[in-house]
Image (cartoon, rainbow, N blue to C red):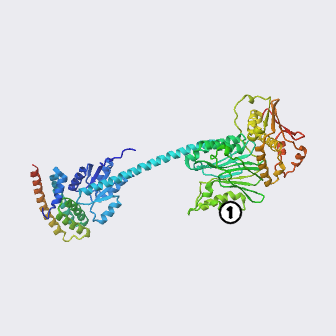
């Protein structure tokens, strides 16, 4: 598909979820807004531990959903939080937000494709 | 056994995960495997759901808001108790620190993201197998505990029944010391002691093959026969015959009872010993401190048919202060840390080096404990000190009611001839008859002793013509009893007669007892004079008879004797 989404994982998810596949995509997208909000909040308060935890949780979701670049950016933030080195995290988070925007668009079209394919 | 939940492989799985997309994905995966899924978004919810639904397996995210997965895992493990509720942590294997933490919290396995459906299925299966294995182990442990409880109850009941049978024993006598575990019965060990009406003490130490209830079963009839026959005045040989026949009949092939039977006669200073298969006992002579070995010369009880069974006893003279020691195999088989057994050599050395005989028993006990390293209760041991203390309480037989009880005026005569004398002991029969007379009952012991003396004089010195002078020393003793057995087996003529007459006398009465024999008689006056010597051993027990009976007169030719017992109304 692209470097942004792993097509093998997506077809496996579709296989597992069946009719519920679009709901899973919606759920992830809604949750990701909340995750990014938490990351911003942690960074704004310079709370390294909170940043690490939020990044860790989001990383897990991203890897499950077949978004490797997004998962990689989460890992960098988690790593920075673990080391307590928050310099440069702002740029990283912006990078993550851009990547999420791309993934969001791709998931929406994936959703579209699935619904049309079914009807 | 109740059917275990999830026997068909389908179980309830609790899933705790705060990411909604991950939760949805995993719940779908688990449901597709056929399991029921409960979902929680944090640790606190997970614990509450666990308490409510008792799922069989938990999938737990490590980092969650409100309560994290580690704390939730600890609480769930605590709630689960002995039951194994596997917890699979949802975390990446690359994070060493988190792995350690989840194992410490009670985690059983890990699953990393992204989830792989095949690995998830394999892990749930493996954990489910483990869970059922644990459940089976618990079931079986509880089953074994229940069985063991049953067994102990049964042993208590059996022990209580056994104690009822044996309570009449005289193991508590002042001159007896013994060592026995309260549950020796179930090691197959048996220790019995009782007085004959004439005052001899019978002691039986038995060791059944095997352990547990099978070993204890044979003890009941043995104890029962031992006590009832001893109380009726039967001899060791007669008791052994009965025990052997009984055990041969009831015990399965391959089971038997090694035993030593003692008869300790403090009045006539005689020890009779029969040992079939037990380790040698010891008679310690007070005169020179030497030990006579009371070794096994027979097969155990319950092995041979009665016609091949040899009941002949070894006879030894006794002196006041002599000690008799009996022990079971368990004593010699006590083992130390390296598996070495105590053995006969160590015991002999201990006996030889003992310079304080009163402490011998305690010294052996201590030596066994030192050797073994702790108190040992699989061994039985007994020591009898020969004393001239009068026996305080002889057993009183409970006799049935009969017409003779109130009858006070009768006579009876018996003549026992050679073939009968060979194999029949008339004393229990005569004593039982005389015990029908109420006035004689308080004197049963004295009466039995006098009857026994008169009978053995009539049979051994009269009918068989044995010379009592032989019994001057230990060697002569053995010779005397060898001759006695030989002549008795060859006996083909002769008789012993008893004449019993009960005469009322006011409220009381008199027993006139006359004994005659077919022998050549003896010089009564000379013998009486000789027996005045206080050192005379054996002999015809004439002084004893005179002391116990109210009257006694020998016919001048020594072929008959008359004794008399009187009683008053209040007796």
Q: Nearer the viewer, residue B44 or B371?
A: B371
Q: Nearer the viewer, residue B558 or B65?
A: B558
Q: Quick check: can you spot residue B72?
A: no
Q: Nearer the viewer, residue B136 or B392?
A: B136
Q: Which chain contains the residue that carries disc 1?
A: B
Quadrant that contains the N terminus of chain B: top left
Quarter of the image where one finds residue B95: bottom left
Please name the residue that numbered disc 1 is placed on: B349
Question: What secondary structure is marked by label 1?
Answer: helix
In the image, taking residue B52 as reference, residue B320 lies left or right, namely: right
- Rendered view: B434 above or below B324: above
* Residue B93 location (% of width, % of height): 28, 63
Q: Quick check: can you spot residue B503?
A: yes
* Residue B66 location (% of width, % of height): 28, 56
Quadrant that contains the C terminus of chain B: top right
Residue found at x 35% / y 58%: B106
The mark tally for this picture is: 1
Residue found at x 81% / y 54%: B473
In the image, taking residue B62 as reference, residue B547 lies left or right, namely: right
Q: Nearer the viewer, residue B348 or B375?
A: B348
Residue found at x 62% / y 58%: B332
Please rate how many residues cluster around mark 1, counting C-alpha atoms within 10 Å: few if below 14, some from 14 to 19, many from 20.
few
* Residue B449 location (% of width, % of height): 78, 42
* Residue A86 location (% of width, % of height): 21, 70
In the image, taking residue B561 as reference, residue B11 lies left or right, namely: left
- Rendered view: A88 above or below B569: below
Quarter of the image where one finds residue B361: bottom right
Quarter of the image where one finds residue A56: bottom left
In the image, taking residue A53 as reference, residue B184 lies left or right, namely: right
């Amino acid at each position: 598909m692209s470097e942004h989404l792993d097509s093998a994982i997506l077809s496996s998810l579709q296989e597992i979820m069946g009719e519920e596949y679009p709901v899973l995509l919606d759920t992830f997208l809604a949750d990701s807004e909340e995750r990014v909000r938490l990351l911003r909040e942690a960074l704004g308060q310079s709370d390294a531990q909170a940043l690490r935890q939020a990044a860790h949780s989001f990383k897990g979701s991203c890897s499950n959903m077949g978004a490797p670049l997004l998962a990689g950016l989460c890992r960098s933030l988690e790593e920075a939080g673990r080391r307590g080195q928050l310099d440069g995290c702002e740029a990283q988070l912006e990078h993550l937000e851009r990547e999420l925007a791309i993934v969001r668009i791709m998931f929406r079209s994936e959703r579209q494709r699935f619904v049309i394919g079914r009807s | 056994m109740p059917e275990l939940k999830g026997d068909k492989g389908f179980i309830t799985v609790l899933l705790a995960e705060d990411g909604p997309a991950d939760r949805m994905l995993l719940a779908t995966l688990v449901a597709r495997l056929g399991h029921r899924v409960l979902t929680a978004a944090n640790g606190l919810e997970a614990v509450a759901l666990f308490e409510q639904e008792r799922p069989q397996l938990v999938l737990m995210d490590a980092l969650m808001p409100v309560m994290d997965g580690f704390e939730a895992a600890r609480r769930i493990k605590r709630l689960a108790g002995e039951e194994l509720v596997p917890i699979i942590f949802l975390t990446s294997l690359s994070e060493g620190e988190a792995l350690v933490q989840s194992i410490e919290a009670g985690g059983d396995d890990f699953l990393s993201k992204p989830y792989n459906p095949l690995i998830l299925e394999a892990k749930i299966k493996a954990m489910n197998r483990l869970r059922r294995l644990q459940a089976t182990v618990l079931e079986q442990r509880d089953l074994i505990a229940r069985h063991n409880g049953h067994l102990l109850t049964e042993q208590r009941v059996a022990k209580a029944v056994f104690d009822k049978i044996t309570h009449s024993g005289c193991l508590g006598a002042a001159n007896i010391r013994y060592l026995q575990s309260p549950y020796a019965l179930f090691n197959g060990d048996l220790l019995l002691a009782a007085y004959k009406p004439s005052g001899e003490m019978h002691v039986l130490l038995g060791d059944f093959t095997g352990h547990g209830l099978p070993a204890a079963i044979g003890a009941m009839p043995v104890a029962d026969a031992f006590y009832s026959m001893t109380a009726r005045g039967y001899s060791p040989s007669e008791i052994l015959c009965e025990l052997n026949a009984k055990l041969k009949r009831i015990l399965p092939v391959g089971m038997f009872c090694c035993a030593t039977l003692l008869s300790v006669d403090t009045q006539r200073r005689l020890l009779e010993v029969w040992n079939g298969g037990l380790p040698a006992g010891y008679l310690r002579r007070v005169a020179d401190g030497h030990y006579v070995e009371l070794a096994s010369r027979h097969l155990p009880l319950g092995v041979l048919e009665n016609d091949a069974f040899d009941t002949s006893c070894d006879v030894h003279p006794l002196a006041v202060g002599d000690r008799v020691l009996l022990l079971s195999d368990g004593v010699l088989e006590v083992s130390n840390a390296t598996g070495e057994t105590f053995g006969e050599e160590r015991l002999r050395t201990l006996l030889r080096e003992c310079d304080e005989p009163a402490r011998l028993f305690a010294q052996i006990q201590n030596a066994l404990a030192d050797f073994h390293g702790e108190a040992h209760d699989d061994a039985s041991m007994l020591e009898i000190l020969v004393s001239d203390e009068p026996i305080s309480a002889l057993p009183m037989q409970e006799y049935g009611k009969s017409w003779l009880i109130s009858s006070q005026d009768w006579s009876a005569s018996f003549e026992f001839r050679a073939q009968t004398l060979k194999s029949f002991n008339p004393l229990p029969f005569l004593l039982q008859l005389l015990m029908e007379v109420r006035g004689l009952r308080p004197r049963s012991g004295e009466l039995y002793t006098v009857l026994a003396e008169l009978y053995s004089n009539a049979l051994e010195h009269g009918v068989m013509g044995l010379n009592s002078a032989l019994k001057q020393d230990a060697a002569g003793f053995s010779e005397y009893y060898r001759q006695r057995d030989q002549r008795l087996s060859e006996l083909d003529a002769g008789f012993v007669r008893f004449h019993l007459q009960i005469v009322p006398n006011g409220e009381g009465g008199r027993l006139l007892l006359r004994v005659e024999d077919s022998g050549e008689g003896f010089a009564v006056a000379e013998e009486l004079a000789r027996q005045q010597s206080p050192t005379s051993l054996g002999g015809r027990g004439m002084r004893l008879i005179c002391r116990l009976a109210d009257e006694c007169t020998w016919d001048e030719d020594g072929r008959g004797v008359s004794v008399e017992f009187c009683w008053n109304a209040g007796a």
